[in-house]
Image (spheres, grey):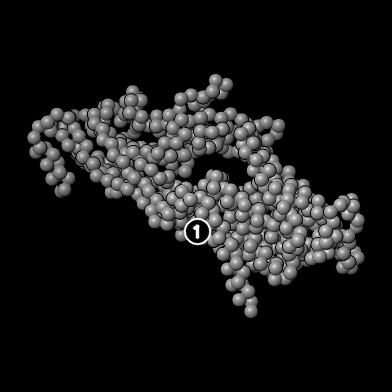
Amino acid sequence: MLRWIALALCLALPAQAGEEVVLGLSQDRVAITATFNGSEILVFGAVKREEPIPNEPLDVIVTIAGPAQSLTVRRKEKRFGIWVNTDAVQVDAAPSFYAVATSGPLSDVLTRTEDLRHKISIPRAIRSVGAPMNIANAQSFTDAVIRIRKANSSYQLLEEAVAVDQQTLFRTSITLPSNLTEGAYATRIFLTRKGMVISELQTTINVNKVGLERWLFNLSREKPLYYGLLSLAIAIAAGWGASAIFRFVRN
Amino acid sequence: MQIYLPIAEVSVNAFLLLGLGGIVGILSGMFGVGGGFLMTPLLFFIGIPPAVAVATEANQIVASSFSGVLAHFKRKTVDLRMGAVLLIGGLMGAGIGVILFNYLKSLGQVDLLVKLCYVVFLGVVGGLMFIESLNAIRRAKKAGGVTKKRKQRTWIHSLPFKMRFRTSGLYISVIPPILVGLVVGILAAIMGVGGGFIMVPAMIYLLGMPTKVVVGTSLFQIIFVTAFTTLLHATTNYTVDMALAVLLLIGGVIGAQIGTRIGVKMKAEQLRILLAIMVLVVCGKLALDLLIQPSELYSIGTGGGH
């Protein structure tokens, strides 16, 4: 019922060219508390348009990207009977977290050139300038980053995870894992028709430590000596405390 | 119950950490080793970043060693004088070790060298202790309980700067203990452990100290060396995770108290053979990791460095 009202409202709007995204997020900030164990973000919205719905089906792509980091990827080889790191390749910028949710198979909803332009698929989200000349098959290093990070849910490709109703309403949910790093998570929504991006919207989700987590983290960076001494004091107090308790129990 | 660690930036089960701390604490109390050579690999295994694991482990060893050494003070099995002499060597060694570690880091391959160090030292120390303890047990059975046989004169007794260590019942030069402390300090800094598993056998076989005194004395020395390491890591790398340390040390200090009591009840030979087996198992595991083809040939390191 609600979706019909929404649709009716959309259609009733005065005529204007193009289609636009109206976005809602279940939360635009994620607080990392002491008991933080991952978070689910609900991304939903509607398409605002001032003209009849075109015949081609509408597709929606949602991406969430964590802060970019530079990485060193190493490969092991057998030397003198043991497995040793030999070749290393620098990856200039790889997001600490990256999720792509689409309303259909990615190859159908997005052409290669559009992917290249907007850097949407996981391999495109990683920027690698190039490997040293002496390393053959440098692509395998980038592939390894994707493979390792997919295995621990840091990178997610969620095909057909976006539900689109009446070419107007869409929603999806993306699970953020518990091993999140702090920072601004860029969230992008693309509308595509026939593999071409027709509209784009960008917003950010802030991921921050709060409370005790925040306090400890700040102390460790701003006053490292005090932090170290406090750690030692806690350690010695705990050691002494346990000893005293055991003596008390024995007597 | 899951808990998010602020410095390590991962979420882990709090009870798992308490349990790990407890088990390693018992072993630490029994054998007088800090337990770092067991705990550090275990922390890698549950997904703690290696840099955080090594630094936090140093902090946790302070706690379990302090708890253990108090129990030993009570039964007067700490040779303070010997501990102080070892500590002089130990702090010098830790300083040299950190410089050496950073030099190796600049060459790359530091992981491999650390692992090779583990395999070689754990293998040699564990193997020698195992054989020696087996012989001792066999001898004890044959001779009907006469075990006091370790007081022969060696070259160690002809060195200058002699000092009387009453608690250990020794009158020897300070040069061998300082050298033992120095070597252990260097290795401890490189391998990211307290170094008890090298120091305990060195004290028994090189210095000829009685086993009961060795455990308390090595714990005493380890407290200061690991406290120094903790501060170094906290101020330079910011990798000490207090939340992780607290959970590990709650389990650790309780375990250490239990372990010390078990250790006192056991015969010295049994204690040594158990420690030897444990050391050999860890050595074997690390050696296999180097020899068998890993399932994932690639590894990700953060930062743009080497």
Task: Tell me if residue B295 comes above or below residue B254 in the rendering.
Answer: above
Q: Residue at x 23, y 41 (%)?
A: A23
* A34, B169: nearer the viewer: B169
Viewed as shown, does residue B171 lie left or right of A93? right
Give the amino acid type for the residue marked by disc 1 in the picture.
Answer: Ala
- Asked if residue B172 can be seen in this view, the reply is yes
Residue lying at the far top in this picture: please name it: A133
* A72, B63: nearer the viewer: B63
> Is the C terminus of chain A in the top left, top right, bottom left or bottom right quadrant?
bottom right
User: Few, some or many C-alpha atoms within 10 Å of disc 1 (few <14, some 14-19, many ≥20)?
Assistant: some
* A24, A31: nearer the viewer: A31
Q: Position of residue A181 (x, y in %)?
A: 42, 45
Viewed as shown, does residue B27 lie left or right of B128? left
Residue A169 picture quarter: top left
Residue lying at the far front in this picture: please name it: B161
Residue lying at the far bottom in this picture: please name it: A251
Identify the element where label 1 is drawn: helix
Q: Residue at x 59, y 51 (%)?
A: B230
Viewed as shown, does residue B268 lie left or right of A233? right
Viewed as shown, does residue A51 lie left or right of B62? left
- Asked if residue B129 can be seen in this view, the reply is no
Q: Residue at x 70, y 63 (%)?
A: B30
Task: Tell me if residue B70 comes above or below residue B277 in the rendering.
Answer: below
Q: Position of residue B204 (x, y in %)?
A: 80, 57
Q: Position of residue A192 (x, y in %)?
A: 26, 30
Q: How many marks?
A: 1
Q: Residue at x 90, y 64 (%)?
A: B142
Q: Which residue is mark 1?
A: B14
Q: Position of residue B281 (x, y in %)?
A: 70, 51
Q: Chain of mark 1?
A: B
